[in-house]
Each structure stands twice: as C-alpha cells, then as structure tokens.
Image: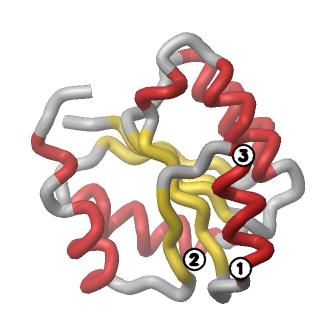
Amino acid sequence: MQRLILVDKSVIIRKVAKRILSDLGYLVSEADETQTALSICKGRLPAVIIVDACLPGATDLISDIRKMSGGSEVKIYYCLVEGKFKHMMQGKRAGADDFLLKPFDRDILTKVFSGQSKTAA
C-alpha cells in the first residue's frame, strides 16, 4: 500500500479526498499546512503528495521535498483552483510532476490514481 500525503487547508476537501484515495488503496496522511507536511516527510517520504497551491509555502514544500534523499522519487501533484499558466509554471519550477484542478471528485481522483497504488512504496 502506497503512502500519500494530502496537504490542504480545507477539512472538507481532506476528508472527501482521504475517503476516496483510501478506497483506491492508499494509506493517506493529512496536513493542513506545509510545515506539518514537511515534518511528516522528514519522518518518512510518501510515494505521492498532493499540495494545495493556495497554501503559503506550497512551492517551498515541493522544493524541500525534492532536496531530500529519495525526494526525486515522490510523485507530486500541485493542486489549483483554476488552470492559470503562471501558477502552473510556479509549481512546475518548484518540482511538481503534475497538476490537479479543484474541485475534484471521485471520478477524477479514480482516473488519476487508480493504477498507481498497486506498487509498493
């Protein structure tokens, strides 16, 4: 079972996404701020992290994870409310692998994450 960290200020988004991603076979940890997520990553890097672009320090979190031993192996999704090119490029420059647009639902998360959770972290 792969470990995944969901970093978002919204309790509702974390709760809904955690339920969906857990059903897809992920062991999901939650963080409501980037410093909490960084502390979790220092303990043990996840296979996947979803970072809300609206959080202060979101791009710093991505860069810090990339600098960690094994950080280049983490699949990082930068989560945006709208697909503004400027914001997407900020995430890409920080080291994000891909993007998710909010609001997301079961169909979107299943499409993106259903095949990935089968390999061990």
* CA distance for labels 1 and 2: 27 Å
Quadrant location of the N terminus in the rendered image: top left
The residue where tag 2 is placed is 12
Instruction: Using the image, determine if residue 44 lies above or below residue 54.
Output: above
Identify the image quadrant of residue 16: bottom left
Q: Residue at x 53, y 24 (%)?
A: 71
Q: Hey, which quadrant is residue 101 in on the image?
A: bottom right
> At which x and y percent is residue 119?
14, 35
Callout 2: SS: helix
Q: Is residue 21 above or below residue 42?
A: below
**Badge 2 amino acid:** Ile
Residue, x 88% and y 56% (percent of image)? 56
Q: Identify the residue at the far right of this view.
A: 56
Direction from residue 39 to residue 35 in the image, left or right: right
Q: Tell me the residue that label 3 is attached to.
A: 94
Above-or-below relation of 78 to 106: above
Look at the image and tell me in which quarter the C terminus lies.
top left
Residue labelled with disc 1:
85
Q: Position of residue 17 (x, y in %)?
A: 42, 69
